[in-house]
Image (cartoon, grey):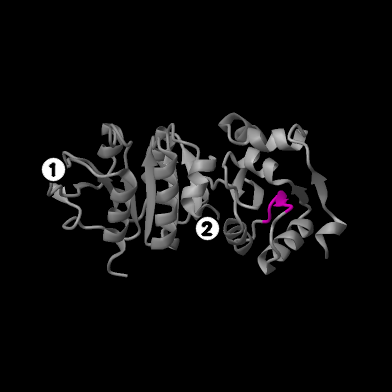
Amino acid sequence: MSVHDTHRVITSLTNDTVKAMRALHMRKEREATGTFLAEGLKFIGEALDQGRAPRMLLVGQDARPHPLLDRAKAETIRAGGEIVVVTHPILEKISRRDNPQTVLGVFDQAYTPLDSLDPTSAPCWVALEQVRDPGNLGTIIRTADAAGCGGVILIGDCVDPYSVEAVRATMGSVFAVSISRTSPEAFLTWRKTWPGSVVGTRLDAKVSHRSAEMHKPALILMGNEQAGLTDALAAACDVNVKIPMRGRADSLNLAIATGIMVYAATDDL
């Protein structure tokens, strides 16, 4: 199937579709439409490998031929999506970058309800309370994917995992990792059924992350970048641990700390 058989061409920066795509940089619009932007052919390929075809595929007029691009076009059409060919200035405007990728995809968001999760399907899971930085969240999703975690659970008022910045930081793992979101109250109720260890991280903890017993499946609970884990969630953990600070710095970046915890919980695999 040729893209020219099915595509639409947009050359005007004031086109309504262009405005709608730019609006996806705003959380309000993403939540209203249930969609998000992913940039680049690598991201599109990761989505296709997970059975996630784009609702809309935007292809720059100067995009070079590539087998993956042909696949993306075919799967977009097969799934009932639309292919839109656009100019380089439109790509710049939508992506808000001076050197944009030549392929963009608009995808449906996907959240997994807590009650649908199977804790025993993976040795480790990550729960984040009120994470604020999209780069941190995206990197944690990528790390969870790399470590073979079952999913990432967002507790309370967290940054949007489908923001452009967070999606970029996942490097495509946003399509591979189960993402759930819940209130603190619902999480505390659900946590009572967890079959393994629930491990919190606190700067005031007495136990080292290396010496704590972690029975699989381990649920690693990380707190907010500034305030850390709240007392209510820390109290719900089987054990709270700390990562030793051996230099002058008194704390680690949240994404780095989460990576250390995840691999500590899975280092015997």
On-image quarter of the C terminus: bottom left
Q: Answer with left or right where residue 126 lies relative to residue 232.
A: right
The picture places residue 149, in percent across and down from the top left corner, at 41, 58
Q: What residue sits 25% from the left and 44% below the top?
A: 252
Residue 129 versus residue 46 in the image, above or below: above
Q: Could you say whether the residue bearing mark 1 is in a helix, strand or loop? A: loop
Quadrant position of residue 234:
top left
Residue type at numbered disc 1: Arg
Tell me if 227 is positioned left or right of 139 in this view.
Answer: left
- Quadrant position of residue 230: top left
- Looking at this view, is 74 or 41 the one in front? 41
The residue drawn where x is 17% and y is 42% is 249
- Tell me if residue 14 comes above or below residue 172 in the rendering: above
Give the number of callouts.
2
Q: Residues within 10 Å of mark 1 (few under 14, many from 20)?
A: few
Which circle's residue, 1 or 2, is located before the other in the chain?
2
**Percent position of residue 205, x then y:** 16, 42
Q: What amino acid is labelled 2 in the image?
A: Ala
- The stretch of residues the image draws in magenta is 53-61
Establish if 139 lies above or below 15: below
The mark lying in front, picked from 1 and 2, is 1
Lateral position of residue 125 relative to residue 29, left or right: left
Distance from Cα at disc 1 to Cα at disc 2: 37 Å
Give the side of residue 189 with respect to residue 116, left or right: left
**Residue that numbered label 1 is attached to:** 248
Farthest residue to the top: give it: 28
| Residue 193 showing in the rendered view | no
- Residue for badge 2: 176
